[in-house]
Amino acid sequence: MQGAEQDQPSIARRAVSGAVLLAIGVVMLVVAWDYPVGQLTQMGPGFIPRVIGLMICALAAGIIFIDVISPNEARDARMHWRGLIFVSAAILIFAGLVDFVGLVPSMFLAVAISMFADDQVRPLHVLVYASLATLGGWLLFLVVLELPIPAFWR
């Protein structure tokens, strides 16, 4: 049992991920501080960066808090490369394709590819979930919010 306790990283070392995230949130807030915020119905260019910066800071505080109050809880120390690769690829594919092929195909591809981060995923689940998520995205962004993004190719 003592060997397992000695293998656990210190509280400070475990809280580093939260600290890095907190630094990113603070930098985002500092950069966006001089931008006009506007109102909820008439958002300025600083509204979304401030909201996201605050959310990142809150998430970071939660991570640090959990790491400090539960120092002896076992954590999986290995890097999850599969998840990192597939989720990053999905984000890049969506960003690269949305202007050329439209929201629907790029969202479908991004959701489908990100699901392969799970090594237990089944093709039918990918098809169903990606279709439902794409339908929800189409309804939200194109029907409800009426964003000027083409649904399909231009």
Image (cartoon, rainbow, N blue to C red):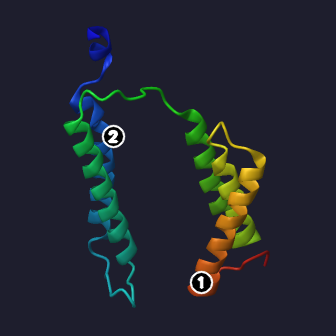
Count of numbered circles on the image: 2
Nearest to N terminus: mark 2 or mark 1: 2
Which residue is nearer to you in this view: 137 or 29?
Answer: 137
**SS at badge 2:** helix
Percent coordinates x, y for residue 28 in the rendering: 33, 61
In the rendered image, which quarter contains the C terminus? bottom right
Which residue type carries mark 2?
Ser
Which residue is nearer to you in this view: 81 or 126?
Answer: 126
The answer to whether residue 143 is left or right of residue 4 is right
Q: Residue at x 32, y 77 (%)?
A: 35
The image quadrant that residue 95 belongs to is bottom right
Residue picked out by circle 1? 147
Q: Residues within 10 Å of mark 1 (few under 14, many from 20)?
A: few
The answer to whether residue 32 is left or right of residue 81 is left
Which residue is nearer to you in this view: 151 or 139?
Answer: 139
Q: Taking 16 as reference, is 96 above or below it?
A: below
Percent coordinates x, y for residue 43 in the rendering: 39, 85
Residue picked out by circle 2? 17
Percent coordinates x, y for residue 105 in the rendering: 75, 66
The image quadrant that residue 17 belongs to is top left
Q: Taking 12 as reference, is 107 above or below it?
A: below
Q: Residue at x 39, y 90 (%)?
A: 42
Q: Residues within 10 Å of mark 2 (few under 14, many from 20)?
A: some
Which residue type carries mark 1?
Leu
The image quadrant that residue 20 belongs to is top left
**SS at badge 1:** loop
